[in-house]
Image (cartoon, rainbow, N blue to C red):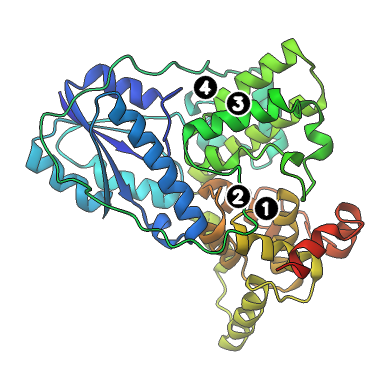
Amino acid sequence: MKSIYWVRNDLRWLDNKTLLSFCSQASTGVFIWCETDSFRRATAFRRKFIIDSVIAFKNKIESSGGTFIITDHKSVDFIPQFVVKHQIEGVFYTSECATEEIAEQNGIDHLPVKIFKCDQASLIHASDLPMTIANLPEQFTSFRKKIEQDLKIHLPLAGPQRIPAWPEEFPEGTLRYRIETEDQKYIHPEIHGGEQNGLDRLKEYVWDQDRLKIYKETRNGMLEWNDSSKLSPWLSVGALSPRTIYQNIKKYETEVAKNDSTYWLFFELLWRDYFRFISLKWGSRLFTDMHAKKKPNGIILKEKRQFELWASAQSGDDFVDANMQELNQTGWMSNRGRQNVASYLAKTMQVNWVWGAEYFEQKLIDYDASSNRGNWAYLAGVGQDSRDRSFNTQRQAAMYDAGGEYRRKWLVDS
């Protein structure tokens, strides 16, 4: 069967069920990565991380005998024409859960070919949930308790034995990316795209530095590289599988130690799954429900001015501004920082939280559509927990940056 592997957020060789399915069923095949609207909205740091991850996957495929096309066209424009021109019989891809990603899928699913879609982006397969997506609990705690009563997690899969060849020639350098990066003075040197870099980071954090056993105690730190796992960039593009992380957690618990910290990293993977499934359940409502009432133009203009101050790290709150400086200069921000700046925008400045979510999409190296939307809605009080999540940012600064070292780094050195 002459086939296409439509490459999406599954940029890995190991534990890639879509890749194994493609390799076992396609007689000849080609890998195609297309630009997405989200990629086009991204700024330099995120774009570079994505492209580096795509190229790393491309190199692995090509070194194994495969053919890999990178194009600046969107999938809905490029793939249908390719199917007709090359008489393609099957398209393989990994299914996603956010509305824009589902719209991309819908643009492919109508093609007159066999469609092979695989659910493999979450730790727990949707088919293994103890409830339907429609009946997913609206609170994470209820979801977690139901999951933990009958936990079903598949073992990671090995890589393929063969890659289908492609008999035709394509123009050399189908697309050459020239990413104009900003000054990378402060960017963490460890954050580089590609599966091997993700696996190296996992090994470094869990085994070489032995940080997993104190993860819960240090995860709110904002200055040190090893304060948290920093695995989210590779998870976001599928260069690292959540099942591979889980396997390392269980191995560590067996061979080294089992405690609250080892559980807590698993707990964070469950949160990631929950937001993915909630995204499937809620769809576009995750962005539109709170905007039923139209605001006067004067209020909107005031919000926009406030938003610009927040985005440019000029809100007047030193803790918020330090975190925004780090984001703007590196593409990274700690989880503690994200909660504070989101609360400050939505609750203190009374600005449309969706603008903040969209800004994070542009900037964050580890942007994940479902986690980003879910967390912003949660902190704005319109998500899965409607309790007031307002943060006292100065109290938070006193707790997590008592000596002011973090603020001095980003406000003085910037």
Please rate how many residues cluster around mark 1, counting C-alpha atoms within 10 Å: few if below 14, some from 14 to 19, many from 20: many
Q: Which residue is mark 4?
A: 128
Q: Which residue is mark 2?
A: 374
Q: Residue at x 21, y 49 (%)?
A: 174
The kind of residue on which mark 3 rests is: Ile
Q: Which residue is mark 1?
A: 378
- In the rendering, at what x and y percent does residue 133 appear? 51, 35
The kind of residue on which mark 1 rests is: Tyr
Q: Residue at x 65, y 38 (%)?
A: 271
The kind of residue on which mark 4 rests is: Asp
Q: Are marks 1 and 2 in contact (CB under 8 Å)?
A: yes
Please rate how many residues cluster around mark 2, counting C-alpha atoms within 10 Å: few if below 14, some from 14 to 19, many from 20: many
Q: Considering only order in the chain, which callout, 3 or 2, is on the residue closer to the N terminus?
A: 3
Q: Are marks 2 and 4 in contact (CB under 8 Å)?
A: no
- In the rendering, at what x and y percent does residue 326 appear? 67, 60
What quarter of the picture does the N terminus occupy? top left
Please rate how many residues cluster around mark 3, counting C-alpha atoms within 10 Å: few if below 14, some from 14 to 19, many from 20: many
The kind of residue on which mark 2 rests is: Gly
Q: What's the distance in space between the residues labelled 3 and 1, CA to CA?
A: 25 Å
Q: What's the distance in space between the residues labelled 2 and 3, CA to CA?
A: 22 Å
